[in-house]
Amino acid sequence: MPASWTLLIVLALAAAGFLIGRSRVLAAVGGDSRKLHSRTGYYGWNIALFTAVPALFLIAIWLFAQPDVNRMVLAGVSLVLAGAGLFLSLGRTAPDFRARNAVEAFVRGLLILCSSIAILTTAGIVLSMLFETGHFFTQYPWKEFFFGTTWSPRFGGGSQLGMLPLLWGTLYISMIALAVSIPIGLFAAIYMSEYASPRMRSVAKPLIEVLAGIPTIVYGLFALITVGPLLRDYFAQPLGLGTSGSSVMTAGLVMGIMLIPFVSSLSDDIINAVPQSLRDGALGLGSTKSETVRKVVLPAALPGIVGAILLAASRAIGETMIVVLGAGAAAKMGLNPFEAMTTITVKIVSQLTGDTDFSAPETLVAFALGLTLFVLTLGLNVLALYVVRKYREQYE
């Protein structure tokens, strides 16, 4: 029996239980719902939840753990469990049954389960990276990984897996991206919140936020086909700084464009959250509009703006596709922004692409790189949340 049929049958049993439960308690009190402990809907939902949820949970776990399991066995066990839940919940359905309490307790347990799944998933990701990183460091010296300046993986021996060139490329491209996105996004937020008319704001903000919905592969193609050749032909070659369209500047500029809505939208919401009384007080004392923005509004919103910038920075550090197509794959350290470089995320992908030996340090290094990137972005996110929380405690 296909799994979809099993799901439909379980849902049909739950729907039937819902209707039977409501009609049963109403019949028991002669149609007078005032004699019931709970509303009639709670009696139906109690039966439906105890019929459907355990069976659906069993199906999901079983298919995840053993995808090639005999579907007839799965269907039989699931339907038996759904039937047992149906008859047990029907058996305790009576006018004095605390159906609302039972439903609320069930839903509360379901919410706790969902929260636990999210937490356990995060813990599983971290532990898997920790274990694989431990295996890597048993085969490769940690000092050479963290402080090495050469990245040259060679399957078969003789690899040099220093991460500093990758870390430098990641930070260099991210700094250029933030140098583009922070002023443009912040100025756009100031204009929309303080100067734009409601009609202009209703048009400008959605248009800026459209940038956030563009897939990163499209940004990467834009960097490869348009931005890279323009920078090469009009800046790099005339200045004698390079002849390649793939460069740190190409990836940084395009990534900065991608980050504009992250900075502008968050900053706009934060600036709008500044109490209007602060603006009115400054204007009442004779300040101009620009002086009010510069000396009152921005200082008051500064912690939140810093949090928005840190969140954008963590987004830039984890970007892959724009770097692959815009910056190249050269792992080296340098200051020339028109040279090709690469980042940690790009090398994680390259080390895990194709037929790989997961017992070799050249493959396991991807987990060490991933853990390093995780710690870096986690630190930025924690710092951003701390700053934003401080801001909220001050103005809410």
Image (cartoon, rainbow, N blue to C red):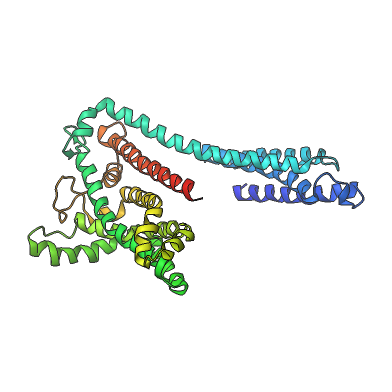
**Residue 391 drawn above or below residue 205:** above
Against 212, residue 4 (above or below) is above
* Residue that protrudes farthest toward the top in the picture: 138
Relative side of 126 to 147, left or right: right
Kindly tell me whether residue 284 is visible in this rendering: yes
Residue 49 locus on image (x, y percent): 70, 44
Quarter occupied by residue 374: top left
In the image, residue 42 lies at what x, y percent?
76, 47
Q: Nearer the viewer, residue 263 or 66?
A: 263
Q: Residue furthest front?
A: 285
Which sits in the foreground, 214 or 131? 214
Question: Up-down: is 112 above or below 297?
Answer: above
At 26% from the left edge and 53% from the top edge, which residue is drawn?
323
Instruction: Estimate the x, y position of residue 276 in percent, counting from the top left.
Output: 48, 61
Left or right of 57 in this view: 121: left
Residue 66 visible in the picture: no
Residue 207 appears left or right of 346: right
Residue at 19%, 37% (x, y): give it.
Answer: 154
Residue 154 placement, left or right of 276: left
Q: Is residue 378 above or below residue 266?
A: above
Count of numbered labels shown in the rendering: 0
Query: In which quarter of the view is residue 148 placed?
Result: top left
Q: Residue at x 73, y 47 (%)?
A: 45
Q: Residue furthest right?
A: 30
x, y percent for residue 205: 42, 67
**Residue at position x 74%, y 38% in the image:** 84
